[in-house]
Image (cartoon, rainbow, N blue to C red):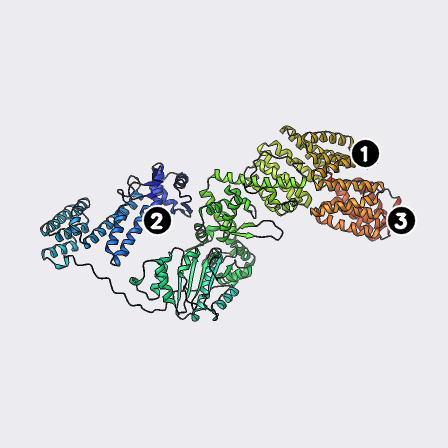
């Protein structure tokens, strides 16, 4: 309990806790004086330092708030201090703050006294006064706090005077004399205490002493403040002198007779907004439901739910006005935001003509009388901003002739038989129509693009649009584009969406304040996540909790309309999306109430979660931690779920693809926030996705970003990994010289870091570049070195890649036997490790061997196997290579029409995924076939395209072959024998620059 009625004290478990130094005690006292109300930052500063605060005042207050939050959490009141602009609000139950308990007991006493229950009133006041331990907030040295404490002391004296008055009414005059003498001595200037002492003495038969008490009071007042006693005290002296019978104690008054019930027709509905726009379908549906006569015994209830500011109240009030004539016995309206059910039922009863004294004491009795009063009537009840079903149930009539419309920020799913209306933001056209009505059609038409952008920034929320529109309407010289420019600044957006009494921030804050402590914590932490959408595991990482617990908290945020749950048809798990405006508010709370250490730890867990997932996806794809190097950055996973179970068996590439935008965002955030190891580790592990799916722009951007971060941090492993990644990207773009330099840099960086595995990966790809450039001796040497290292570190798939690349060399040099042995070994490794991707590459090279050796059936079977694997993995680039090889096979078999169809398919797919090598080769073979068929126009088109692509790829031999064929086509001298004698380098389908070898 927080105790302010005496020296300030925080009590938990029967012991007083250490609140901290004077500054922290002053902050707590100030918050306590304003419990359940917002105390501004300026107010706290004034309480601590007065009119001359230091420059660091705000920071010192934040430190005090952080310390108090820890103390309150230890006392069992986590999240008791909420950040609510422009300051903080202390939220504690009335039983946990002695000032609130005192006020509640005084109110109880007043109600008891008003209804003639004097003894009960005295008991309540005695209990209230027993909470006091001395002067309020004794020992806190602050002018602001002392003013508040003085007000509390005054309340105490007033309660004492009332308790004495009631004790006198109960005939306790003799027992009160001594107490009143002491009170008069302590507070000689309070005339009311002098009056009570005189009455007690008079009724005790001590009239002379009573008159003497008056003379003493007069002397004190004249001496101390120079005034005569007030009229009440003077009249009491005269009454005593005259022995007025009115001073005698009468018998207790009889209970007052019940007051008659006055029949009234309440019309409580607020005015409907004049510019209400859209929602016609919802209006029609609700009106139709509530005007349906054949209802049986059920009373219709409509529950409208949606985000704060989406227009729930406006819709409810508009429908209520349209239905007025259908409910002739009245309309009741209540905003339940700050109202208790007992108080609201009492207000409804009074509106229905029940006199105040006739309102029962308990909620159940009031609700029963309320239902009885409405029985047989047709009354429409609108309950606005309902927090929970329990809050609304006592306010539901029982008569089927009545109807209820309620609004809530959460979906009130436990209301039996309710018709639910889930309200979404306005679509663009309706939102523009609303803006038209507020600011005028001329201004909107003059800046229609900016108006649409304003709608987007306001997220279609009517409240936000009304605020923005009101600001524009009040400033005719403002341009819509100017307001849009202001709103684009995320840090100021909620400030800009404020106009007089309208603020979007307060609307979101109301929703936030009704969350559980854990949901409020997660909401703040969600601002850390910069991915477009998030998963339940992300929330678990932020909270450092189990997946099950995180899902429960997320669903509470969905219920509160602060998050949207998003379900994709092919996805295994729900995703969640934070609205932009809500994210801005979450960022404000994050900066103000979560320490940098907590934020850093939470973000580290989230990035660790991504690392765990991409590691699992890589293992699923490669059969283990092969062909990749990792950082020592910590991994994280929820205790009740494994990453592999989250991804799903055989679904690695699909999962990777679905998370591409989130992974790119995670890499960017890791770079920006200084998590360098996580940054380059994520970027490198995602290369498989970028390569297979052809996401070359993402690949390049994250690699450059992670490389820059690694260089700045002096992380040699990161530098090596990113130069290796960039070299592989350049290799796919056939930028061989750049790729060669990147791999050389990667080898050096890995050597500096002592990373043999990373060096071997880079050396393997450098050898491949040597082969493409004709430096075969250097290539073979590098392959041998890299192969030995792969075997030493246990990278089986890296080993298989090198064996396959060596086999390709011997295939190109017509040593089919050696090539076959190497490929058989590579394929055995791939199948043993379960790496389908590497298996497809090995089988593809075997198909080339079979094509060279004339084993067409085995080549066809192998290529069909490759197609099944790459299509199962949605590997479009792998599919282009397989289709190209299949087209060449069909051409070699003499199935020219089938070959053209297959090659055209390969060309189309290669163009779409920007696989330029296959695009060039397919054009080359299609041009050759067209030339054989004397279709010179088609031949020229294909061969010109091929020659240009080969030139860009710097493949001089292929470029020369295409040029020679192009000359034949242009001369019109092509025939089958001539075409067969043209020297075409590296017969298609047998040899060539397959950059996928790495």
Badge 2, how many Cα within 10 Å: few under 14, some, many 20+?
some
Q: Residue 855 carries which label?
A: none
Q: Which mark is residue 818?
A: 1
Callout 2 touching callout 3 (CB < 8 Å): no
Q: Mark 3 points at which residue?
A: 976
* Residue 947 shows in the view: no
Query: Which image quadrant: the C terminus?
Result: top right
Which one is in front in this view, the residue at disc 2 or the one at disc 3?
A: 2
Q: In which quarter of the image is residue 530?
A: top right
Image: 881 above or below 748? below
Image: 182 above or below 479? above
Q: Mark 2 points at which residue?
A: 94
* Residue 161 shows in the view: yes
Secondary structure under badge 3? helix
Badge 3, how many Cα within 10 Å: few under 14, some, many 20+?
few
Q: Looking at the image, which residue sits at the far front?
A: 297
Query: How far is mark 2 from mark 3, CA to CA?
Result: 99 Å
Badge 1, how many Cα within 10 Å: few under 14, some, many 20+?
some
Callout 2 touching callout 1 (CB < 8 Å): no
**Relative to residue 425, is residue 855 drawn left or right?**
right
Query: Which image quadrant: the N terminus?
Result: top left
**Front-lying residue, 380 or 395:** 395
Residue 703 % position (x, y): 63, 39
Residue visible at 11% across and 55% down in the picture = 240
């Amino acid at each position: 309990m927080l105790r302010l009625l005496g020296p300030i004290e925080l009590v938990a478990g029967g012991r007083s806790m250490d609140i901290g130094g004077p500054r922290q005690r002053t902050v707590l006292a100030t918050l306590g004086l304003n419990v359940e109300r917002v105390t501004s930052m300026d107010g706290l500063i004034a309480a601590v330092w007065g009119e001359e605060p230091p420059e660091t005042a705000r920071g010192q207050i934040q430190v005090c708030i952080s310390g108090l939050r820890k103390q309150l959490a230890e006392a069992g009141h986590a999240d008791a201090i909420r950040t609510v602009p422009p300051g903080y609000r202390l939220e504690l139950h009335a039983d946990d703050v002695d000032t609130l308990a005192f006020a509640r007991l005084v109110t109880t006493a007043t109600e008891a006294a008003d209804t003639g229950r004097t003894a009960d009133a005295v008991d309540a006041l005695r209990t209230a006064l027993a909470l006091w331990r001395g002067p309020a907030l004794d020992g806190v040295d602050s002018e602001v706090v002392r003013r508040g404490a003085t007000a509390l002391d005054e309340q105490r004296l007033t309660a004492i005077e009332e308790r004495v008055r009631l004790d006198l009414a109960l005939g306790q005059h003799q027992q009160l004399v001594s107490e009143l003498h002491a009170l008069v001595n302590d507070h000689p200037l309070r005339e009311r205490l002098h009056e009570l002492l005189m009455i007690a003495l008079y009724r005790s038969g001590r009239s002379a002493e009573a008159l003497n008490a008056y003379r003493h009071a007069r002397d004190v007042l004249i001496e101390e403040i120079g005034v005569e006693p007030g009229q009440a005290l003077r009249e009491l002296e005269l009454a005593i002198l005259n022995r007025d019978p009115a001073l005698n104690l009468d018998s207790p008054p009889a209970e007052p007779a019940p007051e008659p019930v006055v029949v009234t027709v309440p019309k409580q509905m607020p005015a409907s907004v004049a510019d209400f726009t859209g929602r016609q379908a919802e209006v029609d549906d609700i009106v139709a439901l509530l005007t349906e006569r054949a209802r049986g015994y059920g009373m219709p209830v409509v529950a409208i739910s949606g985000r704060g500011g989406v227009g729930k109240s406006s819709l409810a009030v508009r429908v209520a006005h349209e239905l007025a004539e259908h409910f002739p016995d009245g309309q009741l309206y209540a905003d339940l935001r700050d109202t208790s059910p007992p108080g609201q039922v009492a207000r409804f009863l009074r509106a229905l003509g029940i006199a105040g004294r006739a309102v029962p004491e308990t909620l159940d009795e009031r609700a029963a009388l309320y239902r009885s009063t409405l029985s047989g009537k047709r009354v429409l009840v609108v309950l606005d901003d309902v927090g929970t079903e329990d809050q609304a149930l006592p306010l539901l009539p029982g008569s089927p002739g009545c109807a209820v419309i309620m609004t809530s920020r959460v979906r009130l799913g436990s209301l039996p038989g309710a018709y639910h209306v889930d309200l979404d933001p306005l679509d663009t056209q309706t939102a523009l129509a609303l803006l038209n009505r507020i600011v005028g059609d001329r201004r909107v038409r003059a800046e229609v693009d900016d108006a649409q952008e304003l709608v987007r920034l306001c997220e279609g929320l009517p409240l936000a649009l009304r605020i923005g529109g009101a600001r524009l309407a009040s400033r005719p010289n403002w341009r819509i584009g100017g307001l849009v420019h202001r709103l684009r600044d995320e840090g100021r957006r909620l400030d800009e969406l404020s106009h007089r009494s309208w603020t979007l921030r307060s609307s979101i804050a109301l929703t936030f304040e009704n969350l559980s402590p854990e949901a409020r914590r997660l909401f703040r932490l969600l601002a850390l996540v910069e991915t477009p959408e998030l998963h339940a595991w992300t929330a678990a990482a932020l909270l450092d909790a189990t997946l099950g617990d995180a899902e429960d908290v997320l669903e509470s945020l969905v219920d509160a309309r602060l998050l949207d749950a998003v379900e994709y048809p092919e996805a295994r798990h729900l995703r969640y999306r934070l609205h932009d405006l809500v994210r801005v508010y979450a960022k404000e709370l994050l900066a103000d109430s979560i320490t940098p250490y907590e934020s850093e730890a939470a973000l580290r867990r989230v990035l660790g979660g991504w690392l765990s997932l991409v590691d699992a996806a890589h293992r699923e794809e490669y059969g283990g931690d092969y062909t990749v190097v990792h950082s020592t950055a910590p991994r994280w996973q929820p205790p009740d779920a494994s990453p592999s179970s989250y991804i799903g068996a055989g679904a690695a590439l699909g999962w990777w693809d679905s998370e591409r935008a989130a992974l790119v965002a995670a890499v960017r955030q890791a770079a920006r926030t200084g998590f360098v190891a996580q940054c380059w580790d994520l970027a490198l592990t995602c290369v498989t996705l970028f390569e297979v799916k052809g996401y070359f722009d993402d690949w390049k951007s994250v690699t450059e970003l992670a490389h820059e971060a690694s260089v700045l941090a002096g992380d040699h492993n990161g530098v090596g990994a990113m130069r290796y990644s960039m070299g592989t990207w350049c290799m796919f773009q056939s930028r061989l010289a750049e790729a060669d330099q990147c791999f050389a840099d990667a080898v050096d960086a890995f050597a500096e870091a002592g990373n043999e595995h990373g060096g071997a990966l880079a050396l393997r790809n450098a050898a491949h570049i040597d082969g493409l450039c004709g430096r075969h001796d250097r290539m073979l040497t590098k392959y041998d070195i890299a192969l030995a290292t792969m075997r030493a570190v246990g990278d089986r798939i890296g080993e298989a890649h090198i064996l396959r690349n060596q086999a390709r060399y011997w295939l190109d040099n017509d040593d089919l036997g050696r090539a076959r042995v190497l490929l058989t070994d590579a394929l055995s490794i791939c199948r043993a490790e379960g790496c389908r991707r590497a298996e497809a590459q090995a089988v593809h090279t075997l198909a080339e061997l079979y094509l060279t050796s004339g084993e067409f059936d085995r080549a066809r079977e192998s290529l069909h196997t490759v197609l099944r694997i790459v299509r199962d993995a949605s590997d479009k680039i792998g599919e282009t290579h397989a289709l190209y090889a299949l087209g060449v096979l069909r051409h070699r078999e003499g199935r020219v029409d089938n070959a053209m169809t297959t090659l055209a398919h390969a060309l189309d797919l290669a163009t779409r995924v920007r696989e330029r090598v296959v695009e060039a080769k397919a054009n080359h073979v299609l041009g050759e076939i067209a030339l054989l068929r004397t279709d010179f126009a088609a031949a020229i088109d294909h061969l010109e395209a091929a020659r240009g692509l080969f030139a860009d790829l710097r493949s001089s031999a292929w470029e020369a072959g295409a040029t020679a064929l192009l000359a034949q086509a242009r001369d019109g001298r092509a025939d089958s024998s001539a075409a067969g004698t043209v020297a075409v380098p590296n017969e298609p389908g047998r040899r060539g620059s397959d950059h996928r070898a790495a």
